[in-house]
Every structure is written in C-alpha cells, then in structure tokens.
Image (spheres, helix red, strand yellow):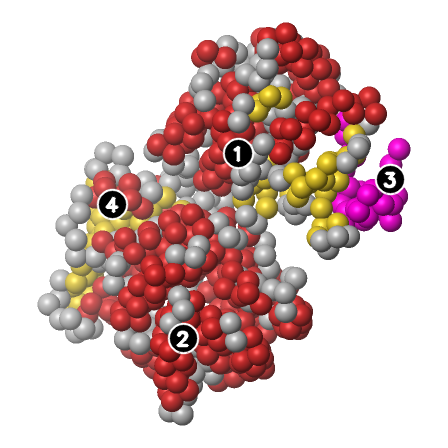
C-alpha cells in the first residue's frame, strides 16, 4: 500500500513519493535525527526476502557513482537522496562516452566486491551535477555456489520481465547462471541507447523482446567506428566473446581514438591570409579579410566552420595542411594571400581537401578597396558552389551587406585583434578602435557588437566598475540590434549583459538561443551560454555547451580553460583538471588556465600546488587583480595568514588609485575563515552587481554553506538554492 506524506518509519518522516515499480515504492523522506533528506525504499511483501541481500550488496560499496546506503529498517532501506534525471539518449558522443566511463567505473567497483547488479537500465542511472549515480541494487547478488546462483537467476528473470526484459543478457533471460559479463551485456544495451536514442532489442511483449536478445542482432549504430566496435563486443550473445571485465571496457573507451562522426555536409577552416605587402600595418587587413570570409561562411546553414582562434593559431607556422585539418576536425581548408597597395588590393585564395591534400579551387581577385566586401562575397559564393552544399533557397548564401568605408573596416579589425588578447590594457585599446570604427561609420553593427563585448569583459574580470561598463555594453548591443536584428554577435553580447549585470537569466537564455539560431558556429555564444547554464546549476547542459564551443574552437585557451570552471562548479574535478591543463598545453604563458587550475587544486585540497599555480597566474598577468586575489586566498587556505593579509593591504591601497572589486577582497577573507568580513565585502559586491557573485554556490564557498547569510545572498541574486 502507498505511504502517505507525514508517515513515520522509525526516525524517518515520509515527505513525498519518488517512484514505484514491480518490487516496491521509493519515497523522499527526512531523517529527523540528522536533519538530512534521504530516499526510503519500501519493498512489496512478496519480495521482502530480498532486503537482506540488497542491504548486503549496497553496504559493501563505497563509490562516488554508486548510491550510498545509510540505514536499514524491518521492511525498508534508507539510501542517499540523489537529485538528477534518468539517463536518456541520444546524447552527443563525447557526453555519452563520459557517462559510460562513470557507469563502467561504478560497475567495476561492484564487481571487485563480488557484486553483480543484474538490473542495469537507464531508469536505474541518474545524471546529476556530479556525474552519474547507479541506483537500485535490488536484484544484485553476491557470487555464491552454483546452486544458489541458479535459484537467484530464476528469481531475477521473473522480476526483470516485469519491466526490464530489454536490458537482460541472454544467459539471464534463459535463467542460466550469470557473472560480471552479464552486466557488461546490459551496459552495452544502455550504451547503445545513449548513442542512438533507441533500444537495440525490441518487441511487442517481454517474450518477443527476449527472443530478439537471444536470436537477433541490433540495427547498426550511426556512430564512430571505435564506438560501434565497443558496443558490438559488449552485445555478443556468448559471454566468452564479450569484454571479460569492466576494466577492459574502460580501457577501450579511454584508449580508442573516438571522434564524433560528422553529422552532415562538409566543414571548413579559414586560415589567416598571408600579408604579401611588406607593411606590418597591412597585417590587420590580411587577417581581417580572412576573418570576414570566415564570418560570412558561418552564416551558411549546413556548414561547420572552425572558429577564428583555432584557425589563426596556425599563422606563420609551416604545418602540413592535412595535420591542420585533423587538429581542427574539418574536411576543407581555405588559405590565401593579400597584397595591398594604395587603394588597390589583390587577393588570392585556394581551397584544399583534407582527405587527399588536393587543391580543388583557386583564384585571384584585383579590386579597389571600396569593393572589398564584393571580394568576400564572391569567395564565399564560390566556396558554397565548390563544396556543393545542399542549401535551400536564399538561406544558402551569405546575406548581402551594406558597404563600409575602408577606414571603419580596418578600425573594426584592429578592435577585434586586441579584444582577442583579453587583458585589461588590450581591451581598453580595442574599445578605442571600435569607437573609431563607429565614428567613421555610425551604422556599423559589428563595431557596436565588438564594443559591447569589450565593455562586458572589462566588467567580468573586475577591471572597471560594473556601473560604468555594463550600461555602455547594453547601449552598444541594443544599437547593433537596431541596425541589424539578425546579427548573432549582438544577441550574444546583450545576453552577456543580461547575465552578468541584470541577473535576468530568463531573458539572457532567450537571447543566447536567438544568437545560436542565427549562427550555430559562434563559439563564444556557446561558451557564454554554458556560463549561464552553470550559474543556474544546469551542469549537464553547461558541459554540453562548452564542449560544442571547444569542438568549434579546439585551440582556444579561454574556451578550454573555461570548461575547467564549469567542471569545478559541477564538482567534477578530474575533468576540471584536464580542461585547465589543456589550456596550459596550448599556451603555457596564458594566465587564465593557471588560475582555473589553481581553483581546481584548491577544491581538491592540494593547497601547495594551488599556491604555485596562483603565483604563475599573477606573474604572467603582470599582477591582474583577479589573479592577485586568488593568490591571497591560496595563502590563506594553506595557513599563511600574514601573506594573505598583505595581499588585502595591497588591494586596499590600490583601490585608492583605481577600481578594485570588493569580491576580490571578500575572497581572501573566505580563505582566512573570517566570515563576518567576508560577508561584509560580499554584500558590497552584491550592491555593485559584481558579475563574480554569480559564482557563490561553487566549492570556494563551502565553508560558508551553513551560514544563513549565504543562502540569503543567493536568494537575493536570484540563483537556485
């Protein structure tokens, strides 16, 4: 019989039903002794004999991806309460691999204890902010004598047919003895569904499903060959033909060169055009021409375009063209050269197929500078034709653009050049160039979008007062949209303001989605949308967005390292460490990934290493305040209060000359454990609408979690509790 809310089971008070199945019901409950939320499983009387077996199985396990058993009563189990959503497919390949590795690790730990799950299915796997959780060892067994095995297998079959026949191994379906290889088959079924969104074995009744498991092969997977092979081996009918251990499955997933299969159509990277003029000033123009062609191509539906940051990483490097294509995961490369003399410009371009290294198109254009956009449009149209894109109607061609004076165009290019450096002095310089472009051409929407982006970043890193930069960023983004409502960069810039300053997360998400509808190739929109999703604690979606950004821009230091920040918030520290170190591998002299790595190391209590990485970030950034603050916090955490207070003094002295974010001072007081001072400065940061207060629920603030002032601050910001 169902149990009503308010019912007491020993010290536990039932709060709400969570789910039910053939064996019993699960309820959300409160442990009145410890004040924590738990999950209580009540078993139907017909299955009560299995409680002891389930309790023995779960209590023997202690693993981050396995639900923890807290207690046992006469007819119920008390387990860890896990917030998450059941596993569902299809998933992007890299997400599926990541989840599969965690499931495999959980099963490997169970098998090491002699425990076989025997009821693995998507409903028993939850996706949580901290990764997967494998639930419900209600059919789990400890390996016993063959006679006991036969009896248990018979019960497993009878119970599982009720709702999980589709995930049984052949030997389990036939009532034969099972071992760890049975879970490997079920894992293969689950992984197949994660990748495809459908079950490999189907039928109208449980009996017909079992018949398919015993006698039929599943439909072929549309996935990378390595993934197809792994799934196929898991799903072999004979246990001897499968992987023999979950360790082997993990090794296959980790060791194979598994890359997503291209969905449809070609992809391209536009390399920086060579400056043949001998004048360094023309470097901006040659880079900018390539970038504008790249931007035109991103507007074409059906064509994946590698981001500028990654494509331009090969500037000046005599790399094999096919290796560049493999690194950027594209099918074609466009490269060229520019010779500019006075008001005349000559552009040469060539398109190369990565598959065989052959040139499939080349041409040369001589024009007056006033015709530069005609050159870009002509090259874009030719590429569309050469690649034979199957695009419908006018949507398959770059949108016509109004002529822009050459001086405005060059100022805009210089603005983006310095904006991409991301340091406070370079951002300030980029603003000057964007303003110059706007002065030359007041209806230039890209210049307004660039101006907005520069102001936003100055606010995010705490280099200028929020009340100074964000209103200017909003005005610039809105002006860009007035001129061109279809400009993805403008929608993304406005969304960034709505996130970082207005804390209007609903409208921000609408603007990010609009930007990505207009240009799905815009990697910065994916990155910043991932930031918003992480702030809202929608970590699985946030990880998906940062992975899309990284796929489009694989050599971007900020995007790779920013993935580390998202993983830290999700408390997936192994992945955070990997992402930040990838950023360092790309450019060891960039301070941002060292800063992210320092935060990751701190979250794992590796304090000396955190201090070392913080020092690197400070040194490489010439003392940028955000990194100095992290170093002060790191000194405080390791117990060097004198150095931490010295940093506070330095920041306070600096605040008499220039803006210093109160968040940077609050952070050090958090490290010192001085809660009153920490909240005093956090309140100032809140009043100023400092963007970094959106980080409050992350591990840095775990020492404040029990203080009601933190929840009050989170509530006033409008963040999820």
- What span is colored magenta in the figure? 1-30
Which residue is disc 3 drawn over? 3
**Which dot, 3 or 4, sits closer to the camera?**
3
Please tell me in which quadrant of the rendered image residue 219 appears.
Answer: top right
Magenta stretch contains residue 463: no
Q: Depth check: 328 or 207 in front?
A: 207
Query: Do the CB atoms of the residues marked 1 and 2 lie less than 8 Å apart?
Result: no
Query: Split into 4 quadrants, where in the image is the C terminus?
Result: bottom right
Query: Do the CB atoms of the residues marked 3 and 1 lie less than 8 Å apart?
Result: no
- Note whether 353 is above or below 373 in the view shown: above
Tell me the tag on residue 106: 1
Looking at the image, tell me whether mark 2 or mark 4 is earlier in sequence order: 4
Which residue is disc 4 drawn over? 324
Q: Is residue 484 left or right of residue 280?
A: right
- Note whether 521 is above or below 674 in the view shown: above
Looking at the image, tell me whether mark 3 or mark 4 is earlier in sequence order: 3
**Which dot, 1 or 4, sits closer to the camera?**
1
């Amino acid at each position: 019989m169902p149990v009503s809310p308010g019912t007491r089971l020993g010290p536990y008070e039932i709060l709400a039903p969570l789910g039910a199945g053939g064996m019993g019901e699960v309820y959300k409950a409160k442990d009145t002794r410890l004040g924590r939320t738990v999950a209580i499983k009540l078993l139907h009387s017909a299955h009560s004999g299995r409680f002891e077996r389930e309790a023995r199985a779960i209590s023997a396990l202690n693993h981050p991806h396995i639900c923890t058993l807290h207690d046992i009563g006469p007819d119920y189990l008390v387990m860890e309460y896990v917030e998450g959503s059941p596993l569902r497919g299809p998933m992007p390949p890299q997400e599926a691999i990541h989840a599969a590795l965690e499931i495999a690790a959980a099963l490997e730990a169970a098998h090491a204890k002699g425990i076989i799950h025997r009821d693995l299915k998507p409903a028993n796997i939850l996706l949580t902010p901290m990764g997967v959780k494998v639930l419900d060892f209600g059919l789990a067994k400890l390996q016993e004598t063959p006679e006991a095995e036969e009896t248990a297998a018979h019960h497993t079959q009878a119970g599982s047919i009720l709702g999980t026949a589709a995930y049984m191994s052949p030997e389990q379906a036939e009532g034969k003895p099972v071992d760890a290889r049975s879970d490997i088959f079920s894992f293969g079924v689950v992984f197949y569904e994660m990748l495809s969104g459908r079950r490999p074995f189907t039928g109208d009744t449980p009996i017909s499903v079992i018949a398919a498991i015993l006698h039929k092969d599943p439909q072929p997977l549309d996935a990378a060959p390595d993934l197809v092979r792994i799934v196929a081996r898991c799903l072999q009918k004979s246990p001897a033909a499968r992987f023999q251990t979950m360790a082997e499955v993990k090794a296959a997933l980790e060791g194979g060169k598994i890359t997503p299969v291209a969905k449809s159509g070609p992809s391209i990277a536009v390399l920086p055009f060579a400056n043949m003029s001998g004048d360094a000033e023309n470097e901006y123009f040659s880079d900018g021409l390539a970038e504008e062609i790249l931007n035109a191509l991103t507007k074409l539906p059906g064509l994946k375009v590698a981001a500028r940051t990654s494509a331009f990483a090969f500037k000046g490097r005599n790399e094999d063209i096919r290796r560049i294509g493999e690194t950027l995961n594209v099918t074609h490369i466009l490269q060229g050269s520019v010779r500019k003399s006075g008001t005349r410009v000559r552009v040469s371009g060539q398109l190369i197929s990565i598959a065989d290294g052959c040139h499939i198109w080349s041409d040369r254009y001589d024009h007056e500078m006033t015709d530069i956009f005609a050159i870009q449009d002509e090259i874009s149209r030719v590429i569309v034709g050469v690649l034979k894109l199957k695009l419908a109607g006018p949507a398959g061609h770059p949108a016509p653009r109004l002529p822009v004076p050459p001086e405005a165009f060059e100022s805009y290019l210089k603005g983006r050049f310095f904006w991409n450096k991301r340091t406070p002095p370079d951002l300030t310089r980029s603003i000057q160039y964007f303003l110059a472009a706007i002065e030359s051409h007041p209806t230039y929407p890209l210049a307004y979008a660039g101006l907005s982006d520069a102001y936003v970043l100055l606010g995010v890193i705490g280099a200028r007062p929020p009340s100074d930069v964000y209103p200017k960023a909003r005005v610039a983004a809105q002006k860009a949209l007035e001129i061109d409502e279809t400009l993805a960069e403008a929608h993304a810039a406005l969304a960034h303001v709505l996130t970082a300053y207005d804390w209007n997360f609903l409208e921000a998400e609408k603007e990010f989605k609009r930007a990505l509808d207009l240009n799905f190739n815009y990697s910065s929109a994916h990155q910043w949308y991932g930031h918003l999703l992480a702030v809202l604690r929608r970590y699985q979606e946030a990880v998906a967005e940062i992975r899309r950004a990284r796929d489009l821009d694989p050599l971007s230091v900020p995007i790779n390292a920013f993935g580390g920040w998202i993983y830290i918030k999700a408390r997936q520290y192994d992945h955070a460490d990997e992402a930040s170190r990838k950023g360092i591998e790309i450019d060891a002299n960039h301070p941002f990934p060292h800063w992210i790595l320092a935060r990751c190391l701190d979250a794992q209590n590796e304090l000396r290493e955190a201090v070392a990485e913080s020092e690197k970030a400070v040194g490489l950034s010439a003392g940028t305040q955000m990194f100095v603050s992290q170093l002060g916090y790191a000194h405080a955490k390791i117990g060097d209060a004198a150095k931490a207070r010295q940093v506070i003094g330095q920041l306070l002295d600096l605040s008499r000359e220039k803006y210093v974010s109160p968040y940077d001072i609050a952070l050090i007081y958090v490290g010192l454990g001085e809660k009153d001072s920490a909240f005093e400065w956090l309140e100032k940061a809140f009043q100023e609408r400092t963007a970094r207060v959106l980080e409050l629920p992350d591990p840095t603030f775990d020492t404040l979690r029990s203080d009601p002032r933190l929840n009050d601050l989170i509530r006033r910001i409008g963040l999820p509790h």
